[in-house]
Image (cartoon, rainbow, N blue to C red):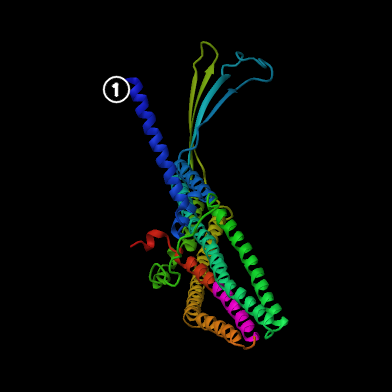
Amino acid sequence: MLPLSLARRTVASGLAVALAWATVSAAYAAERPLSLEDAIARGLQQAPLLDAHHAHITAMQEELARAGRLPDPTLSVGLSNYPVTDPGAFSLHSDTMTMRTIGITQAIPSHAARDAERALAQARESDAMAEHAATVQRVQEGVADAWIGLWAAEQEMALLRDLRQEGELAVQLTQARLRGGEGSAADALAARAAVDTLDNQLEQASADLASAQAGLLRWLPDAAEVTLADAPDFGTLPFDQRLLYQTIDRQAPMQQWATRERVAQADLEQARAAKHPDWSVSLMYGKRAPYLSDMVSLQVGVSLPLFTRNRQDRGISAKQAQSDAVQFQHEDARRVQRETLARTLAAWQGWSQQIVRDDESLLPLARDRARTALASYRGGGALQPWLDARRDEIELRLTYVRALAQRAQLWASLAYLLPRQEVSP
């Protein structure tokens, strides 16, 4: 057995090592580039909305646990056969029938009513879980959109910065030609204006970057200074896109419709259960005057749903109509989801084709055009062709970044439609 002092030193040393390891691990996590998947995983852990849904599910589970139980019994105390007129008015002992009573009554709803109550509680629990699944999908897509927004802002900043050095070179060339007596002041001013215009665009890109960082902080409050990892391939879905058309009802936005139908059907069954009679049992003990026998009473009661035409039948008709309405709404939502899916896939594929064309053709052509125009000016040509080419290249690069962002956001809206277990290998 270790001495007490040595044991304390050992424990302290162990705690110090654990603390140091935790600090190093936290520092490593903070320095490690943030991938899209890591951002989504952290966002799901830190989303207050999901905590709220967990609490809601817990509430529904508690409701389910108490559904279908017998109601609490009713305790009653009273005074029976108490005289209020002469002879013997207001006396507890003047009449042999006077007694003090205590009783208990237990209501017993019909089995149909209790079963319907349990079914309704189960349906509401399922509805809460389906709502949670839809919320998980919204959180995933929200985090992905925020991450993509920051990534796109960084891409825009990098593409614009790449052009600034060439602009400074053009300014130097125009000034050199002006000093040599070959150029014009107008060219020098135009080149400087082009650089200043690019600086304005860089300032706007910097503001967009700060705004995108704030958007990511909405989901990841601890990601104030984060470096993004490389983006996934936004041109390829993580599963066969045909799976989306085969799983319309299992997609997160649609899952709650099935549970809504279950809730509506459970409401209907509860209305039908109202036509079944409910029972009650009452037991009463009566204490009479001394030397007289005490009394015990037992009563059994039953409700009589005899006139149901304007009561229970009306309620059943109303719940049936509501159930039919939910089914029709479900079918309409299914059609809307198919349309939305087709439109999203078409738009995503369209942006993908545009990006490929920009990468393979338009951007290289614009770059070569600007370089050729600047080389021509260096050889004695005019400056205006370079100014035109530079303006067109900047516009093309900005359009390219917007295409990247649009495709990535559409990719996210498709990639997270299904719960993860639906697409896991």
- Dividing the picture into quadrants, the one containing residue 84 is top right
In this view, which residue lies farthest toward the top? 291
- Which is nearer the eye, 171 or 398? 171
Residue 333 lies, with reference to residue 266, above or below; the image says below
- Which quarter of the rendered picture does the C terminus lie within? bottom left
| Residue drawn where x is 67% and y is 86% of the image | 182
- Which quarter of the rendered picture does the N terminus lie within? top left
SS label for mark 1: loop
In this view, which residue lies farthest toward the right? 185
Residue 65 lies, with reference to residue 224, above or below; the image says above
Q: Residues within 10 Å of mark 1 (few under 14, many from 20)?
A: few
Residue 334 lies, with reference to residue 138, above or below; the image says below
- In the shown orientation, is residue 209 left or right of residue 260? right
Image coordinates for residue 421, horizontal then vertical, percent: 38, 59
Disc 1 residue type?
Leu
Q: Is residue 204 magenta?
A: no
- Which is nearer the eye, 53 or 254? 53
Q: Looking at the image, can residue 76 be seen?
A: yes
Image coordinates for residue 342, horizontal then vertical, percent: 48, 75
Most common SS among magenta residues: helix
Residue 137 lies, with reference to residue 286, above or below; the image says below
Chain part drawn in magenta? 383-402
In this view, which residue lies farthest toward the front? 180
Image coordinates for residue 16, horizontal then vertical, percent: 40, 34
| Residue drawn where x is 61% and y is 75% of the image | 167
- Which is nearer the eye, 198 or 47? 198
Q: Is residue 392 magenta?
A: yes
- In the shown orientation, is residue 239 left or right of residue 309? left
Identify the residue position indicated by label 1 in the image.
2
| Residue drawn where x is 57% and y is 82% of the image | 370
